[in-house]
Amino acid sequence: MAGIDETIAGPGLGSRALTMLARWALVIALVIAWELTTRARVFTPFMLPSPERVLARIWDDGQAGDLFINIGLTLYRALTGFFIAATLGLLIGVAIARGGALGWFFDPVVSVGFPMPKITFLPVIVLWLGLYDTAKISMVVFDAVFPVITGTVLGIKSVEKELIWSARSLGSRERDIWPRIVLPAAMPQIFTGLQVSLPIAMIVAVVAEMLMGGYGMGGAMVQASRMADSPGIFAGIVEIAVVGWFLVKGMATLRRRLLAWHPEAETPTGV
Amino acid sequence: MTKNPLVQGAVRYLPLLFLALVWEAASRFELVSSSALPSLTKIAAAWWDLAKSGDLLDNGASSLWRLGAGLAIAVVVGAALGIGMAWWRPLDMALGPLVEMFYPLPKSALIPVTALWLGFGDGSKILLIAMGCVLPVAIGAYNGARSSDKALVWSARSLGASRLRVLRDVVAPSALPETLSGIRTALAISFVLLVASELIVARSGLGYLIGFLGSNGTYDSMFAVVLTVAGMGFVADRLYLLVMRRALAWRE
């Protein structure tokens, strides 16, 4: 949440190092507090295993190779679904924003579909597509596509008319207007849609794995839960949290790079 | 083009009717297997049977209770947290990094943990929804409270309002719009977590009913419950939008 101060004050190198330090100090303090609660037996080791047991568990999984298989599979499903959703969402969003027959068809479908809890359709997807990657990735796409569509529509609709007019009056060809003026100008909101969509892709991939079983971080957690293996559950949380954190931060960095030319290069808070 | 809003609405939502007709026809004429996609009329009949037997009502009630309780906790705690962090800097310094660390956590990872702590009943779902929804509310409240007009705060202070009075009469109202949109995000997340956790670990609730009917192979009933939950999510969002517009009407 320090993002706001940084953008206003424009931090020097020293203050940035200080913030980094404060952040790590907090993480370390949290782990120490966790260790102390388990030492003091506030909860049973079953309810809250100690940090070193959880870390040892992650280490063991890493040695056995399971860790990388599970993370890799979950990431593969979430990211494949995300890329398909991004492409589809962009195309459908452009269709809706341009109007026309396709736009007319998709507009009500999206406005009814967006607020629905898509995850409810998971058993239907299982019925149609089975339990393997196709089903899991389809579920991810189905859920992650909507924020991209609405972001695209919103972005395109808020492009200033003057921008298009001046491009025209400066002699742009009509077929250049969309790819070179409208889409770049709509980019910040499209990107915000993508930034909402990626965490959803992760959430859904994990839920789909929990429900359909097999390898993957969600599957491993459900397996641990069935075995009443609480270090396994907490190891899963830590792994998923770390992966989720890197994905979200990665998107924010990508946004700053790609939109460096735009005043809205900073990620809006709350995404 | 006609200006009549009724006609416009009908034209706008025509594609949905079209989709429903295609669905019905595809199933009736066995273009797809009718067990994989039961016709809408069959689903409606199954829905009516479920409603008469009380299954829908009982499980619906327990789902709604979990949803309501979890969201209520998230809204109260989240709003207090967000406004508190914006209002009192030490709290921001202490909790800000924590919020930033836990916000990207895919919330569904919490399902096994809450089941481990509180079992398969209502408690684990309420805790899950509360934990999953508190941060969006807190972030909304925080952003809203921070954006409150400094000039308003200063003039209220210089006119002799106490810090608490400023908090209540200036900061809280200006935090309202963003808090409310944070709650809307939370509402969407709460449905996802509710259904997911009921599908995975539960003995009652609509998600449980879907799983139960699905493994029984009574797919028309399963579709009936799936569509009911999807409809509930949609209606909840639209109702919330109405309330939100009402609550923010004073800003115009």
Image: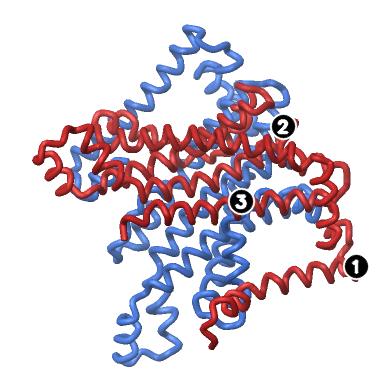
Chain colours: A blue, B red
User: Circle 3 is placed at which residue position?
Assistant: B233
Q: Nearer the viewer, mark 1 or mark 3?
A: 3
Q: Mark 3: which amino acid?
A: Gly
Tell me which residue sits at (31%, 28%) in the image.
Answer: B94
Position of residue A200 in the picture relative to residue A13 (left or right): right
Asked if labels 2 and 3 share a chain, the reply is yes
Q: Mark 1: which amino acid?
A: Glu
Q: CA distance from mark 2 to mark 3?
A: 20 Å
User: Circle 1 is placed at which residue position?
Assistant: B30
Residue A103 shows in the view: no
Chain assignment, label 2? B
Lower sequence index among marks 2 and 3: 2
Tell me which residue sits at (11%, 36%) in the image.
Answer: B160
Q: Quadrant of residue A71?
A: top right
The disc at residue B94 is: none
Q: SS for tag 3? A: helix
Q: Compared with residue B163, is residue B41 higher up or lower down, i.e. above or below?
A: below
Lower sequence index among marks 2 and 1: 1
Q: Nearer the viewer, mark 2 or mark 3?
A: 3
Q: Compared with residue A22, is residue B251 higher up or lower down, i.e. above or below?
A: below
Q: Compared with residue A54, is residue B86 higher up or lower down, i.e. above or below?
A: below
Q: SS for tag 2? A: loop
Position of residue A221 in the picture relative to residue A25 (left or right): right
User: Circle 2 is placed at which residue position?
Assistant: B202
